Amino acid sequence: MLLKILLSISLLGLPPIKSDQSLKLQNAIQSTTGFGGFADKAIDGNTNGNYFNWSCTHTQASRNNWWAAELEVKTEVNMVLVYPRMDYHRGAINGAKVYVDEQLCGMISYVKNKTSYTVRCANLVGKTIKLTLSTHYLMLCEVQAFKFVSVDGGWTDTDTWSSCTKRCGTGTQNRTRTCTDPVPQHGGADCVGIAFQTRDCNTRPCPSKIFVFISDVAMSLIVKLIV
Ligand SMILES: *[C@@H]1O[C@H](CO)[C@@H](O)[C@H](O)[C@H]1NC(C)=O
Ligand SMILES: *[C@@H]1O[C@H](CO)[C@@H](O)[C@H](O)[C@H]1NC(C)=O
Ligand SMILES: *[C@@H]1O[C@H](CO)[C@@H](O)[C@H](O)[C@H]1NC(C)=O
C-alpha cells in the first residue's frame, strides 16, 4: 500500500501507462479515387462503416489497388486495425494485405459482420502503412496503427484476510492477491512474490466448558438482580 502511494506520488503529473500506443498517420494516398472516397478519409478519426457517412475511402478501379499513409517517424509497429465498409460490398475487404514499408504484416480474411480487423505485425519497423487489394475496390473506413509498450505486472492490494476458521484455540485465515493491477502486458515482467498466504488466528485458548457454564449462570444471576 505504502509502496503504491509512493509510486503514485512519483508518477504524479505523468500520463497513465498505456500498453497500446496509438501512432499518428498522415499524408494518405491511394492508387485511384472514385465515388468521393478520398484517401485521407481512412485517417479522419471516424470509423463509421456506412459509406454514406462519407468517412470511407474508395478506389476507382476494381483491381490492383493500394492505399498508404505515413507515420510521423520511422518506428516499430505492432498492430494495425482496419475498419472495412459495412453497408454494401461486404466481403470486399477479403484478401487485403497490410504492409509496414515493404514488409508484409498480415492478410485480412473476411468475417461476416466484423466491423474491424486486427492485424498483428510482430515488431516490424517502418515509416509507411500500406494496404493492397488485387481483386476488388479497396474501401477503408479507418486505418489505425499501434505500437505496444510493455507494462510490468502489479499485485492487487492484500489488506483483507479471510475470517478466522475458529473463534478461539487457533484457527487459520488466508488472503489471496493476483497479478492484475495491472496485468503484465507485451512482455512486461510478471509479479514477484507469493499470491496466497495463510496464517494462524484467534490463538488464545478456548475457555473450558465448565467455565462457560459458570459464567452463563453468573450472567443470568446478574441480569435477574438488575431487573
Ligand atoms: C456518422 O458517423 C458518426 C461517427 O461514428 C456518427 O456519430 C453518425 O451517427 C454517423 N451518421 C450516420 C448517418 O451514419
Ligand atoms: C449480421 O448483421 C445483420 C444485419 O445487421 C443481421 O441481420 C445478421 O443476423 C448478422 N449476422 C451475424 C452472423 O451476426
Ligand atoms: C481461505 O479461507 C476461507 C475462509 O476461511 C476458506 O473457506 C478457504 O478454504 C481458505 N482457502 C484455503 C486454500 O485454505
Image (tube, rainbow, N blue to C red):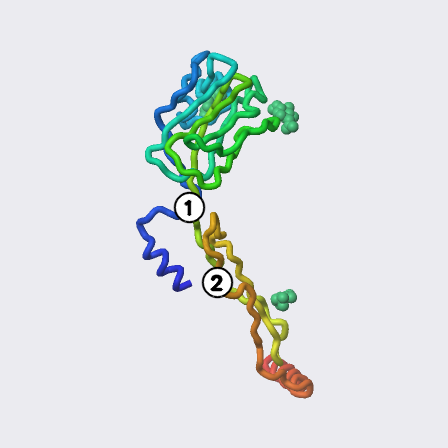
- Give percent across and percent down for residue 140: 48, 23
Q: Amino acid at mark 2?
A: Val
Q: Earlier in the sequence, mark 2 or mark 1?
A: 1
Q: Which residue has dot 2 on it?
A: 192
Instruction: Say which quarter of the image contains residue 57.
Output: top left
- Give percent across and percent down for residue 147: 42, 40
Instruction: Tell me if mark 1 has few (under 14), some (14-19) or many (20+) residues whose alpha carbon lies within 10 angstroms of its own.
Output: some
**Label number found at residue 149:** 1
Q: Amino acid at mark 1?
A: Val
For the residue pair 102 and 80, the one nearer the viewer reads as 102
Q: Is residue 189 above or below residue 105?
A: below
- Give percent across and percent down for residue 175: 55, 65
| Secondary-structure class at tag 1 | loop
Mark-to-mark CA distance, 2 and 1: 20 Å
Q: Residue at x 47, y 12 (%)?
A: 60
Instruction: Tell me if mark 2 has few (under 14), some (14-19) or many (20+) residues whose alpha carbon lies within 10 angstroms of its own.
Output: few
